[in-house]
Amino acid sequence: MATQYEQYGQFEQHGQDRPHRQRDRYREDDRYGQHERYGQHAPYGQDERRGGGYGRRSEERRHVVPAGLREPLTARHWRELLYVLLGLPIGIALFTFAVTMLSLGAGLLVTFLGVPVLAAGLAACRGLGALERARARGLLGLEVGDPEPLRAPRNGAMSWMGAVLKSGTSWRNMLYAVLQFPWAVFSFVVTVTVWSLGWTMLTYPLWFWVFPVYGGQGGLQLFGDEQHSVYLDNPFEISVTALVGLLITLASPWIVRALTTVDRLLVHGLLGPSSLGARVVELESDRGVVVDTAAADLRRIERDLHDGAQARLVGLAMDLGLAKEKLREDPQAAARMVGEAHGEVKTALQELRDLARGIHPAVLTDRGLDAALSSVASRCTVPVKVDVDLVERPAPAIEGIAYFTVSELLQNVSKHSGARSASVDVWRTDDRLMLQVMDDGVGGADASGGSGLAGLAGRLDAVDGILVVDSPAGGPTRITAELPWRGGLT
């Protein structure tokens, strides 16, 4: 009956039992709800990812050496260092290939050969981009999704080449191959200079003896001309040199990390999925959910008609046929059978009304959410308080989704919660329609495992909505749905 724990639960813990009093704060708190749509779990996991989890804090307390002094020896620093060092040869190869294929293809465009050459170069850059994403994932821990695939309208070489040339992903991968090279040169030079200088100066007390033994001078020459020479050869100068080397060594991980931040931006911005492409993929997925939901609703309606009203009408027709045959022989029995058929007609009509209400209730169209939700609440097995605070009505589609969302949540309250009372609150915050259903039942609601609320969350997600559930064991349960506001009726 839920998705994961969200920030909405914090209001009840602080004694704020009326959610509409905190409406202005919901939009800020709902940012946490975005994690719900991408499969991320509870805030406790977020704390651990940010270094705020209890396990990580206790682990850090076990270290005697402060984190800043340990950083040059951590595995993360060495992975980032390896990423920068590998960046130069890889950048040279990428730059050479991209510029060669681009210039060759552009030069041959006067003939037909330029098109396949350019398409082949772009396709190869897509493959090289996949390798770069893998390198960033392995060494930088950067998770970047795969870009949208090629969309060739037809099979065949010409269709494939056209799709490659029109794909923004292909050109962004080639742009990465061009831009990564100068940055790789800069970051390689800075990293090697800082890292080697720091460790060389830090370890100077261990190797300065080579100068008097093999060089004929007291130590490393810091300055020299025809008249003056300055050597680092006494204990004080050696100690200062080592101290400066220590400072540079301690700073080098942060310098490398700052340099790799630019690499992260390049990989994420040029090799990952574009915002438009990701939106297209999301809309395609949502369209599939909508189609599946519509098909499931049609199957449900067909099943309800077949097993309910249709079966009753068939039985009614048979009973009326028997009554017609007995009308002359046994009028009293025929009258009794007609009376029973009359009762069956009333039952069939009620089932048809319920079915029509399940498709789209007339009260929702005529009088809006307030009246429709009050009608739903009156049929709940526990007392339900309804508070709808809307100046105008949303679009009919959003209004219908809101109605069926609350209806299904109240059905769950009746069937599973064991509650003594419940409440429904509906309000608008900026451009979002907010729904909240609360009950004082046993709690423990969970949307995992393919429950009915998992399907409800999918329906809301198909229209850019969010389902947020706070249902600790022992209750109470607080379920909040957020839908986009699309202007409708006033």
Image (cartoon, helix red, strand yellow):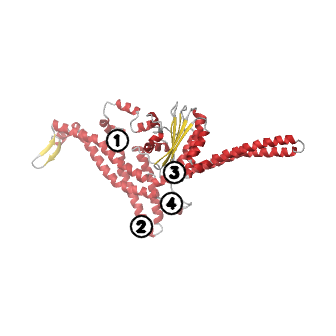
Identified by mark 2, the residue type is Gly
Identified by mark 4, the residue type is Ala
First reached walking from the N terminus: tag 1 or tag 2: 1
Q: Nearer the viewer, mark 3 or mark 4?
A: 3
User: Which of 58 and 333 lies nearest the eye of the viewer?
Assistant: 333
The label on residue 392 is 3
Q: Nearer the viewer, mark 2 or mark 3?
A: 3
Residue 309's x, y, as percent?
Answer: 72, 45
The label on residue 107 is 2
Question: How much space separates mark 3 and mark 4, taking CA atoms?
Answer: 46 Å
Q: Residue 235: tell me if it is visible.
A: yes
- Residue at the spot of label 4: 163
Residue 100's x, y, as percent?
Answer: 40, 61
User: Which of 252 and 419 lies nearest the eye of the viewer?
Assistant: 419
Position of residue 138 relative to residue 122, above or below, is above
Which residue sits at x=73%, y=43%? 346
Question: How much space separates mark 1 and mark 2, taking CA atoms?
Answer: 44 Å
Which residue sits at x=36%, y=44%? 80
| SS type, badge 3 | loop
Identified by mark 1, the residue type is His
Q: Residues within 10 Å of mark 4 (few under 14, many from 20)?
A: some
Q: Residue 455: tell me if it is visible.
A: no
First reached walking from the N terminus: tag 3 or tag 4: 4
Residue 422 is drawn in which quadrant? top right
First reached walking from the N terminus: tag 4 or tag 1: 1
User: Which of 40 and 85 lies nearest the eye of the viewer?
Assistant: 40
Which quadrant would the N terminus be assigned to in this image? top right
First reached walking from the N terminus: tag 2 or tag 3: 2
Q: Residues within 10 Å of mark 3 (few under 14, many from 20)?
A: few
The label on residue 77 is 1
